[in-house]
Amino acid sequence: MIQKIIKNIKGFFKNPKEVISFFLPIVIMLILLIPVDYTVTFPTGGTINIDNKISVSNEKKKNGSFNSAYVKQAKGNILTFTLGKLIKGIDLEKNEKIIYDNETIEYYNFRNKLYFKESISSSVKLAYQKANKPINVVGSNMYVIYIDEHSNSDLKVQDEILKINDVIVNNLNDIKNILLNYKENDVINVTVKRNNKEIDVKSKLIKLNDEVKMGVSIITIYDYDVSKDVNLKFGNKESGPSGGLMFTLSIYNKLVDEDITKNRKIVGTGTIDLNGNVGEIGGVKYKLKGAVKSKADIFICPYENYDEAINLKNKYNYDIEIIKVSTFDEAIEKLK
């Protein structure tokens, strides 16, 4: 049997045309998939029905829907780069323009994943507070998401910070209060979880903006006592903070008796913080196009993105109402 297989292989390689016809498509495909230092944005955005992704215990049934707008992006390779050069509407952006100094594209993607989790966390707390429902913090996780180029620390992106000099820290204020007792060039011990192992690393303090710091950016993800009441059905593909406003509106609408959708399909975008402030986002032209394609009644966007959105609406005669907001409260007021 083995000898027969070997004989067939030898016979195959004796025919150059067969060899070329077999391997050439494979070689071409491998070449097309070679990575390039670009991020590709495709011209068609899309929408996700947030109400189907979030459920709340004893939620009130509503007729309309809240939807988050998103942008379709992909890592650049020779194939997508070529398409971007040939097809109008596909945007190419060098990775160095979208990442921070001293950051890799992998760390950028990690940071965006955590921004998404932070966005969900903030949305839950804000929605419960605005709906006058009780909510309390029961835990938190702090992660390093960026290392400043001036940092002199053994900390790494993705480290989860647990202690500083054996003192447990739960939030940024805990860290700031500890660092008040130290000066520039002091070395502190930081206990972190790295690759599921708890280890100690050193960090030499530096001065940034007249404050003594470790020279790293940290994000805090809070856990609340309503986690059993709120069920999130998101996958691993979602990233970035731009859905924060719509997450908050969806959760809030499930908690209150009034239906602020009023039987309308509402699509929107915008970051949200714990104080209810709505922040600027990128890719509004793709997101608006996705909202129009999905036949939405309303498109909500931050003030900073409104001019671009309204100009696009007028240019292409989009049949959609555009609402600009700067806070969660303003969004509720205008939707009512």
Image: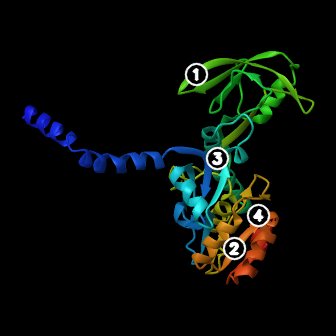
Which is nearer the N-term, disc 1 or disc 2?
1
Q: Quadrant of the C terminus?
A: bottom right
Residue underneath mark 3: 112
- 86 is higher (above) or lower (below) than 63: above
Q: Measured from the top left, where is residue 140 in percent x and y?
A: 65, 38
Viewer-proximal residue, 116 or 79?
Answer: 79
Residue underneath mark 1: 198
Q: Measured from the top left, where is residue 221 in percent x and y?
A: 66, 42
Which is nearer the N-term, disc 1 or disc 4?
1
Residue underneath mark 4: 328
Residue at image location 68% in from the left, 25% down from the top: 155
Q: Quadrant of the N terminus?
A: top left
Q: Measured from the top left, where is residue 245 in percent x and y?
A: 70, 61
Residue at image location 29% in from the left, 51% down from the top: 21
Q: CA distance from mark 4 to mark 3?
A: 22 Å
Q: CA distance from mark 3 to mark 1?
A: 24 Å
Viewer-proximal residue, 166 or 299?
Answer: 299
Mark nearer the viewer, 2 or 4 = 2
Q: CA distance from mark 2 to mark 3?
A: 23 Å
Mark nearer the viewer, 4 or 3 = 3
Which is nearer the N-term, disc 2 or disc 3?
3
